[in-house]
Amino acid sequence: MLPNYRAVIIDESHKYKDALRTMIMQSVDKNELHNLAIRLRKALKRCGGYEDGKESITACIECTDILYHFIESQIEQNLNDNKDEHTIYVTEKIMSIIDALKRELHILKSILISKKATQLVSRIDDTMKRLHAFTCPSDYFYWAQNDCGQINKICFAPFDYGNMLKSLQWNKSIPFVMTSGTFVY
């Protein structure tokens, strides 16, 4: 994570916890999934694979909408409590929706590869990798981000991130200096 060092000074350490969480957190954004489907539709039209993939593109969009709707309904009683984040419990229903989405993305990836139009393959792989985290609910904790009463991002981080950070940082025999100052005029 950091190059070789003999000491570390962390300024603004009151923001350190949030910065660490952001660093290890991953997310699946509803708009990102919709935009990927749009880009896949365009790529398939250009390479001649649209007819083979149009049902999978439609299914990807539908799965995304169903997933976010289901998550919103899971936490809807809390959406108006002015919190930006809400805990998500990954249920069998969520896992089955994500499995369906991953299957359709795999089909689209296969079509793109067969048509030698591989420019979006790495984006599909990255998306599928992040979606896979939802099939391992005992390894991650999940939360949804609320934006004006609507869920637009599902986030997750590994449960053992404390141990990860401890091994990367605090178990080393290198001094850490943490500073924080707030001035009021």
Image: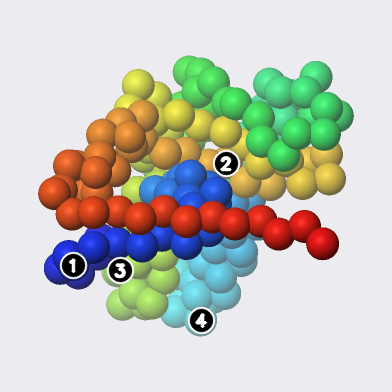
In whole angstroms, how far apart are the C-alphas of marks 1 and 4?
A: 50 Å
Q: Residue at x 47, y 56 (%)?
A: 179
Amino acid type at mark 2: Ile
Q: Amino acid at mark 4?
A: Arg
What's the residue type where badge 3 is placed? Ile
Looking at the rendered image, the quarter that the N terminus falls into is: bottom left
Instruction: Name the N-terminal-most of marks 4 and 3.
Output: 4
Amino acid tagged 1: Tyr
Q: Is residue 89 above or below residue 175?
A: above
SS at mark 3?
helix
Of pointers 3 and 1, the one earlier in the residue sequence: 1
For the residues labelled 3 and 2, say whether their Cβ atoms are less than 8 Å apart.
Answer: no
Return the residue at label 1: 5
Q: Nearer the viewer, residue 22 or 12?
A: 12
Q: Is residue 135 left or right of residue 149?
A: left
Q: Nearer the viewer, mark 1 or mark 2?
A: 1
Residue 5 % position (x, y): 18, 67
* Front-lying residue, 100 or 51: 100
In front: 88, or 67? 88
Residue 12: x and y in percent read 53, 58
User: Tag 2 or tag 4, which sits nearer the N-term?
Assistant: 4
Q: Earlier in the sequence, mark 3 or mark 2?
A: 3
Q: CA distance from mark 3 to mark 2?
A: 29 Å
**Label 3: few (<14), some (14–19) or many (≥20) C-alpha neighbours in 10 Å:** some
Residue placed under numbered mark 3 in the picture: 113
Q: Which residue is mark 2?
A: 154
